[in-house]
Amino acid sequence: MNTAVGGGPMLLQNGEIYITNEDEKMFTGKAINDKHPRTAIGYTKDNKLIILVVEGRSESGGGATFAQEAQIFKDLGCIEALNLDGGGSSCLLVNGKETIKPSDKEGQRATPSMFIIK
């Protein structure tokens, strides 16, 4: 296998908002409508990769719901998008520098998932 991506729920399919939280039973209760930090990935019809990290739980960022996250991808012209993870450890480093501030009070922590583009 050359590439594998895991996450969920799906946010867009064939250019339309299609949140698969209920199908996948990813998050229970009202989590789907709560605003949290989010990390997600999508691509456009011309194969441009879009990586999105939403800051949340802080004065500088209020987070996003899955519906808001899906709408951002749709507005950016994505045809497919997938939520990867979220919460206090959401962060995107570009050349080793944080693009958002993780909301975990203890700062960055080891996580079992990440992706690297080289």
Image (tube, rainbow, N blue to C red):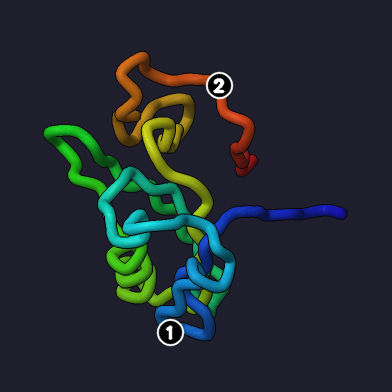
Where is residue 5? Give x, y as percent.
Answer: 67, 54
Say whether disc 1 or disc 2 marks the residue closer to the N-terminus.
Answer: 1
Instruction: Name the residue located 25 percent from the left edge and 40 percent from the top edge.
Output: 56
Residue extending furthest toward the front: 29
Q: Which residue is mark 2?
A: 110
Say which amino acid is labelled 1: Glu
Specify the quadrant that holds the N terminus: bottom right
Residue 75 marker = none
In the picture of the structure, the residue carrying the numbered disc 1 is 16
Q: Amino acid at mark 2?
A: Ala
Secondary structure beneath dot 1 equals: strand
Look at 46% across and 83% down and name the residue there.
15
Left or right: residue 29 versus residue 35 is: right
Query: For the residue carrying disc 1, how many other residues have a C-alpha within 10 Å: few (<14), some (14-19), or many (20+)?
Result: some
Find residue 33 and report its horizontal and vertical position in percent: 29, 61
Q: Is residue 95 left or right of residue 35?
A: right
Horizontal relation, residue 23 to residue 17: left or right: right
**Residue 113 sits above or below residue 110 on the image:** below
Q: Nearer the viewer, residue 81 or 32?
A: 32
Q: Residue at position x 64%, y 40% from top?
A: 118
Q: Is residue 3 left or right of residue 46?
A: right
| Residue 37 horizontal/vertical position (percent) | 33, 43
